[in-house]
Image: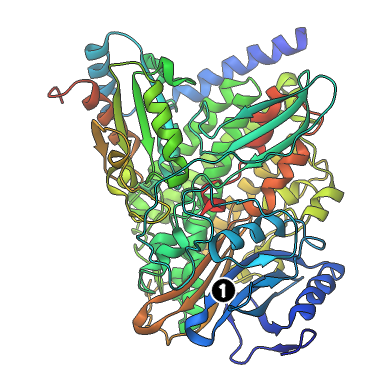
Amino acid sequence: MTPDSIKEAEGGLYSNLRCRKFEAGAVAWRNFAETTRSDGGRLLALWGTDDCDRDGRLRIVACYLNAESLAVVEHAMDSCSKPLYPSLVEFFPSALRMERAVADLLGIQSMQPDHRGWLRHNGWPEGVFPLRRSFNASTQYQLDSEPYSFIQVEGDGVHEIPVGPVHAGTIEPGHFRFSVVGEKVLRLEERLGYAHKGIEKRFEELRQKEGHKLAARISGDSAVAYSWAYCAALESITQTTCPPRAAQLRALALEHERIANHLGDLGALGNDAGFAFGLTQFSRLKEDLLRIHQPIFGTRYLMDFIQPGGVAVNLPQDAPQLLLDHYAALEISVSELRGIYENHAGVQDRFRGAGVLSNEIAVRLGAMGLAGRASGIAHDLRVDCPWHPYNDVTLKIATQTTGDVAARVNVRFDEIVQSIMICRELLTNIADGAIVSDVPDAAPGILGVGVIEGWRGPVLIALETGPSGMIRRCHAHDPSWQNWPLIEYAILGNIVPDFPLINKSFNLSYSGQDG
Amino acid sequence: MIKTLGRMIRTGILTEKIERVARPDSEADEIHAKLRGILGRALCIRQVDAGSCNGCELEIQALNNPYYNLEGLGIKFVASPRHADMLLVTGPVSVNMEEALKRTFDAMPDPKFVVAVGDCGACGGIFGESYASRGAVAHVIPVDSTVPGCPPTPTAILQAILQAVSPGQV
Ligand code: SF4
C-alpha cells in the first residue's frame, strides 16, 4: 500500500450504527482526518493493535463520528522498524492523550513531541508493551516511582497547588496541578492513569460470551451503556438479533442509569454550591430509584442485566405499573426541586458563569455528550443515528448555550424529564416474548464496533474475535477521554475553591479513561 | 439578603414536606443502634479508591443519603488519613495506586482498621492480578475485613464497618 492510497476494507465492519471501514497509507491516514474535520466530523476513539503474529504488522485505528454514521480507518505499520504514524492532534486535539496511551501500551509512536507516559507511571518498565501479543499479562514488576514533568508556569507570585491522587471525598483517583496567583487559576494540568488496571489485556483472556461482564465494570456508573456496547459489537459480528422485548428493556435500563446518575450529580452540585438540602433531596430520590431496581431488575446497579443476545432478567408482571407510579412521583419531586434551585440566589450565584466552556473551545476540543450539549453542541446518538429501539422513540436533544455549571445542571434536569418520557413510551409499547436470543461463537478475526450514548456521552467497544470463541482484542473508549481536557479550560480564571463544583459539573470518569 | 433568607425559610419548609414521606429502612435503623452502642464516639473514615470501577464508590456515597444517614451517627468521612480510625479501600489495587495507598495507610494513627470493599478489594474481582493490578487490597496493606459484592449494598458496607470496629458482636 502506498502512503497516499486508501481503500474500503474487504469484509467491512460490523456495528449497531451505520459504518464503513477503510485501510489507509500514512498520508491518506492524515488526509482522512483533515477531511473529516473540515466536514464537521468528530474523532470518537483511537486505539492500536498488534497483528505481528498474523502478518507482522502493528495497526493504529481511528473511529470517526460523522453526521449519521461511523467511519473506521486503519493504518498498518511494519513492526520491525520503529513504528511511527502521523499524529491527529492538529485536527483533533483530543487525540493527544489517546496517542500517548497507545504508545504506553503498544509502543506505537505518533509524530508529536509529548512522549511522557500517560497510563504508564513506571509500574512497568519503559520498552515493555503490555498489549503486544508476546507480553504475558501476569508479569508483575516492582514499582519505582518516577517524577512526572508537569509544565511549569513562571511569573511573579505564581505558585503551584498539587491535589491528589487521593482526594478528600469518596471519589476516584487523579492528580490535578494548579498554577495560581492568589486564588485565581492560571493553569491546570491533569495527570490521570491511576486507575489503570489492565482491562484491555484482561479481555484477551475471556470468552466472547463473558466479555460483557468486564465491559460493565469499565466504569461502574455506566455499566448498562458499556455492557450494551459490548453486546452490540458481538451481536453485529454474529448477526444476532436481540428480541424486541429485550431491546426495549435494555433501553429502559439505559435511561434508568441516566436518571440515577443525573439525580446523584444534581444533589452533589447543590452541595458543592453550599446547599446541603439539595444533596439530601436528590440522594433520596436516587436511592428510591435504586431500591425499585431490586424487585424489578434483581439488583440496585445493573452490572449484569445486559447479556449477549438480550437481557438476564424479565420484568415481573406488576413492574410496569410500579414503574409508572414511580415516574409520576419522581417527576413531581424533580420539578419542585428544579424550582427551588432556580429560585435560590446563593445556588444560582455559584452555578452561573462558573467554569464556562465556550462553544468555540468545546467544538475545537471535540467535547462529547452532556458536556458538549451544555456548550451548544447538539449531538446525541439516540437522535443522530438511533439504534434499535431508539428509532421508535421520541426525543429532542437537550442543549444549552452558556457552557457554565448552570448549563450542565439544566441539561441534566431536561434529560431526566426526557428519560422519564422515554421509559413511559417503552413500557406502554413493550413487546411480549423472549428476552434473549442464542448467540453463536463468532469466527476469528472479525471486528465489531458497538457505540451507545451513555449518560456522559457515547461509549465505544471495538471487539475483535479470536479463535475458539475467545476475544482477540477489545478496546473500550469513554467520552471522558475527550472531556477531561475541557476542564483544564473551563477552570481558567476561576478560583481554586470553585474547582470541586466545576469538576463535578462535568463528572467525568477516571476508571473509564484509565482502563 | 432578605430575599435570600426568604428563600431559605421556604426551602426549610419544603425539606420537611419531602422528608416526611421518607421512611428509614428498618435494617439500617438496627445497625445505627448497634453502632451507637459500640462506639459511643465519632468514627472517622478515610476512603481510598485504589483502582475501582467507581461502582463501589457510588454505594459508599449512598451511606450519606437520608436513609442510611451515616453522618447522622457521628461517623464521618475525613479528608486526612491522620484523623482517620478506619480506611475504606475499594478496587483491585492498581499498580499506579499502590504507593499512594501504602502512604495513606502509613499516615494513619494506631489503632487502625482497614475494610476492603467489594469483590475487587476482597479478591481482585473480575480484574484479578496482572501487570497493572495487584489484585486484593490484602496484597498491599493488612486488611481487617472484607465486604463481598459487586458492588456491595450500602447495608452490607454498614454491617462491615460495624463488624470491623467490634469483632464478635455482630
Ligand atoms: S467490586 Fe464491582 S463495583 Fe466494586 S470496584 Fe470492583 S467491579 Fe466495581
Q: Is residue B158 left or right of residue A91?
A: left
Q: Tell me where residue B48 appears, x and y as whole percent.
A: 43, 33
Colour scheme:
rainbow
Q: Quadrant of residue B70?
A: top left
Q: Chain of mark 1?
A: A
Q: Tell me where residue A495 appears, x and y as whole percent.
A: 75, 24
Q: Residue at x 68, y 49 (%)?
A: A483
Who is closer to the viewer here, A359 or A132? A132
Compared to residue B47, the image places residue B73 above or below, namely: above
Compared to residue A82, the image places residue A180 above or below, namely: above
Q: Quadrant of residue B83?
A: top left
Q: Secondary structure at mark 1?
A: strand
Disc 1 under 8 Å from ligand 1? The reply is: no
Who is closer to the viewer here, B21 or A368? A368
Q: Amino acid at mark 1?
A: Val
Label 1 Cα crowd, 10 Å radius (few <14 / some 14-19 / many 20+): many
Quarter holding the N terminus of chain A? bottom right
Q: Residue at x 62, y 18 (%)?
A: B11
Who is closer to the viewer here, A94 or B153? A94
Q: Tell me where residue A246 appears, x and y as whole percent.
A: 44, 69
Residue A339 can be seen, yes or no: no
Q: Tell me where residue A420 appears, x and y as whole percent.
A: 57, 50
Q: Which residue is mark 1?
A: A449
Q: Is residue A108 left or right of residue A358?
A: left
